[in-house]
Image (tube, rainbow, N blue to C red):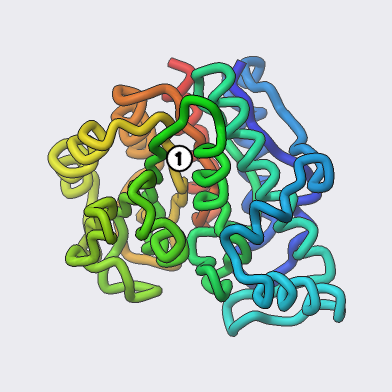
Amino acid sequence: MFPVIYSDEFLEHDNGRFHPERPERLTAIVDAIKAAPWADQIKWQLPTAVETRRVMPLVQQIHSQRYIDTVEEIALSNGGRLDADTGISPRSYDVALLAVSAWLDAVDQVLTTNNSAFVLARPPGHHAERQRGMGFCLFSNAAIAAYYALEQSGVERVAILDWDVHHGNGTQDVVERDARIAYISLHQSPCYPGTGQASEQGFHNNVLNLPMAPGSTLADYQPMFEQKVMPFLTKFQPDLLIVSAGYDANAADPLANIALQPEDYGLFTNSCLQLTRRIVFGLEGGYELTALAQSVVATIEACLA
């Protein structure tokens, strides 16, 4: 059985009317998974309650207390905005903490079974830096999951592969000083947030940024995986691979200009599985609902093969 960690509570984070990061992203994915021919192989799991997991100390390890308090205060004040792109509704603080818990559940699941799992949660996290959230993101889910994994027995190195179309400036900000964590990002350049130059290699040569030109297709991505991503990961030899699984590099997506197709993500997943089956996939971006749902289906289908 393939674990998908999901809760309807993730629908209660509200960025505001007409915002692209909307609850329908999750419902479209849930419907597509349930309609797949292998739907009976999915094990749906609710995330562990935040209090039970003691999530807050882990969030405080990554984010400043001042920033955490700001998110909570905006939520308690009936909502507002961190910036023009990033909304906070009355339930957003609690939901964002539950999303962190879901990512941690996936780490536990993968390390216990030595097989992959998918975190179907929102808000996303890879733009959330230590001192601020931005780009639809509140807490740095992938980075928090990486540090949590490093506390587990037998885990000495964690790699984060970010195939979202936007560079994960928040994830890099959190992990680039830690030699135990590698961060790899393929992202459109130029594009929001303007970070992720190839010259940015981390403090221990533990960062690999691969800027992709607008209009890039699988013909451009596949050599990057074969010649850059996989050799980097193979050399690093992670005990756990975390994938910041954004699907906004699809040709149909309205927020960028990369031209991938949903089935391409199945190929990327297969490449990762050749390295290890200990993979936590966690949802980041992806805003055209059909392409998003088909891409997640392609990712899970590769894991089931």
Residue 74 picture quarter:
bottom right
Name the residue at 30% across, 25% down. Answer: 275
Name the residue at 74% across, 74% down. Answer: 69
Q: Is residue 302 left or right of residue 122?
A: left
Residue 68 picture quarter:
bottom right
Q: How many marks?
A: 1
Residue 148 picture quarter:
top right
Residue 7 seen:
yes
Q: Is residue 293 left or right of residue 273?
A: right
The C terminus appears in which quarter of the rendering? Answer: top left
Q: Could you tell me residue 139's position as x and y percent?
A: 61, 61
Give the vertical position of 117 relative to 121 (above or below).
Answer: above
Name the residue at 37% across, 24% down. Answer: 276
Q: Could you tell me residue 169's position as x and y percent?
A: 41, 66
Q: Which residue is mark 1?
A: 242
Q: Nearer the viewer, residue 107 or 96?
A: 107
Q: Is residue 191 left or right of residue 221?
A: right
Q: Is residue 229 left or right of residue 114?
A: left
